[in-house]
Amino acid sequence: MKKILIIEDELNLRETLYDVLAVNGYQVIMASDGRDGVEIAIDQSPDMIICDINMPILDGYQVLKILSHAFSVNEMPSFIFLTANSSQENLRKGMMLGADDYLTKPFSNQELLEVVEMRVSKRQNLTSAILSIERERISSELHNSLQQLLVAAKINLDSIGDGSNSMSENELKKYKNSIKILDKAIAETRTISHEIISKKLSNDGIESFLFDLKDTMVSTEILKMSIECDLSFRFSENKELMICNVIQELINNSLKHANCTTVKIDIRTMNDALLLMRYSDDGIGYKNEGFKSGFGLKQIVKKVERFEGLISFNSSKGASCFIAVPVSKRERK
């Protein structure tokens, strides 16, 4: 049952909202002013907040600003303003602060329910999309980071094995068991990561992965995606996985931080020796220092450089990323 917090100083309207939402299966909690609303929101973490703008103590704008700092991007409840003033200036101010929608007084019960149901659905879709991308990102880290550490540890243990003649029987037994455990961990890590990502690549490689991803984003109404894909050949599995992982990480950043509605991906091969990709969104951009310190972006740079590729970012509004990766003849499929 979805929990909705109503912050409204007018008693009759507050109780009417409560009755309509409760009858339609929502768990409803109420606050009569902005200060109480902030305290209840932080204490009870509702799925949605319906908040009047003109209130005593704290107005609706102040409530939204405080809660935007109190909650992370992923945890922030959907936020709907109630207002009797539907001027463009007021609407723009609320949207710039992060409001999801507006209800202009007076409104019907049907209008209320339609807005609430739409925002509940979009929040669920957003959560599902982020979880999906996070799951695939974790798979990438299993494949490209943890697995490498496990392999390095095994190599070191193998080198110790050269001196196994000097080990006691008990030490030799522990050494062999450690090798077996590492081999099993490496195999399971590889299986998990490949099962998750390789399904996306399928028989048609990156192009199929991209359009599957686009279908997911469009069907859940999370992002619009524009894709230009002109690949004249397939290349090594590791390089294809790297490109897919980078795209997932870039989309994840767009979803979490860019406040964007559209993502564009242009990926192509050139002169039978180079893979070029440009990724951009229509979001608010990032501060330059964010590119230097952001963990996700650092991981993207590491992935590309691991394959001797070049990467550059444009952090202004409508942020973009450009990647060039060499592809040798022996890598082609």
Image (spheres, grey):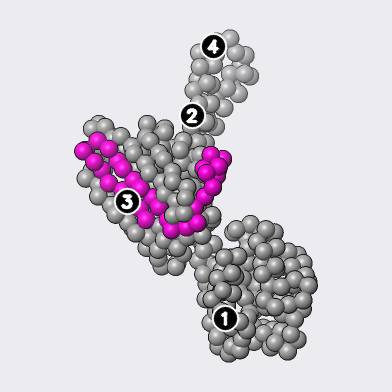
- Mark sitting earlier along the chain (3/1): 1
Label pair 4/1, CB-CB below 8 angstroms: no
Q: Nearer the viewer, mark 4 or mark 3?
A: 3
Tell me which amino acid carries mark 1: Ser
The range drawn in magenta is: 264-293
Tag of residue 86: 1
What residue sits right under mark 4 in the picture?
163
Q: CA–CA distance between discs 2 and 1?
A: 61 Å
Q: CA–CA distance between discs 3 and 2?
A: 35 Å
Quadrant containing the C terminus in the rendered view: top left
Q: CA–CA distance between discs 3 and 1?
A: 40 Å
- Mark sitting earlier along the chain (4/3): 4
- Mark sitting earlier along the chain (2/4): 2
Tell me which amino acid carries mark 2: Val
Assign a secondary structure to mark 3: strand
What residue sits right under mark 2 in the picture?
151
Assign a secondary structure to mark 4: loop
Residue 39 occupies which quadrant of the picture? bottom right
What residue sits right under mark 3 in the picture?
266
